[in-house]
Image: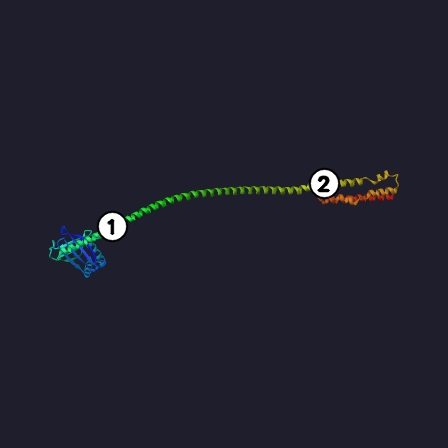
Amino acid sequence: MTVSVREIYVSSEPDSSYFLRLDWRGQDLGSGFQLLLTDGQDAWRGDVSESAVCEEAEELEMQTERYIQDLQQALTETQSSVTYSFTLTPSPPNHSSTVTLAYEKVQKDISFRLGSVLLKAVPEPVEAVRELLIHSLQRGNTLEHHNQKLEDENQRLRREQQRITAELKRYAGGKEALEAELYSRFVLVLNEKKAKIRSLQETVTHLQETSSEGQKKGGSEKSERTAGQEEDDYGGSTDEEPEEAHATAASTSSTRERSTASPLDDSLKDITDVAPSRKRRFRNLGAPNPSSSQRKRADPPAGSSKQQQTPPQRSTDAAAAISAEEDLFDDF
């Protein structure tokens, strides 16, 4: 059974106060409850059944759960923003008579009646008051013990909080030191990486410049080599021309000398000689060595086919002239 005690004031007697004790079974007042009202000298007791609670809720056109909640707040003095008032009839009550206790709900200057209960006088009010005092003392002791437990728990929690706070401060200090160390290491590593990147960039730039210069030099050398080859090709042909021309001129002059040196003059100089000897001499003079002439023709470089073909023709003409002279001497 749950017991609740509170002090109430009656509107008709503002200077006097009463103590109201409420007993009920179950979770709430829906299953019925019992009231005890006393002013310290006299006492009145009454019961409210479950059916009476349901009738009051239907009369007020309220939900039963909502009505039971308001009724419990009014009789147990639960902290609420709503004000409740009590009326006692007759007032002042007679210690041996029956009284009616009514309770109302006041909200925004509007009050409506929650219910009422009929209380009968207790034959031995001293015993009822004594039970009320005993319950109040027990309730006070229970609350005091509970308060002490809460205080001890509060102290323990406070010490735990202080310990946790100290641990957090220590961890925060270690965290800051670790962050500073890690940051310094990070800066060191970052600077090293930056320096390495700079050196790599400089190396890449140097290699690019070197490769570009090499390409430029290679291109210039290639162009010079090509120009040199062209000059060699054209220059070689022009340089060889004078030699070939010189050789051709020499061969031509020798042929001309042979052709102009008439065998008649020689025959005139050698006129005292006998004819057969002259004939043999002219034969020796007119028959040039073909191997030596061929070697002379092969010595010049193969520069011009035209120049190589010209000497054989001239030598043929010279041979024809010599043969004609021989024929002339034969006639002589």
Mark closest to the chain's N terminus, 1 or 2: 1
Quadrant in which the C terminus appears: top right
Identify the image quadrant of residue 311. top right
Q: Percent x, y for residue 202?
A: 51, 41
Name the residue at 85% across, 43% down: 280
Name the residue at 36% across, 45% down: 170
Name the residue at 76% across, 44% down: 295
Q: Percent x, y for residue 152?
A: 27, 49
Camera-side residue of 314 and 287: 287
* Mark 2 crowd level (few <14, some 14–19, many ≥20, 10 Å Cα): some
Q: Percent x, y for residue 286?
A: 82, 43
Camera-side residue of 194 and 279: 194
The disc placed on residue 148 is: 1
* Mark 1 crowd level (few <14, some 14–19, many ≥20, 10 Å Cα): few
Q: Secondary structure at mark 1?
A: helix
Q: Amino acid at mark 1?
A: Gln
**Horizontal side, residue 106 vs residue 168: left or right:** left
Quadrant in which the N terminus appears: bottom left
Q: Amino acid at mark 2?
A: Glu
Q: Secondary structure at mark 2?
A: helix
Q: Percent x, y for residue 111?
A: 18, 53
The disc placed on residue 95 is: none
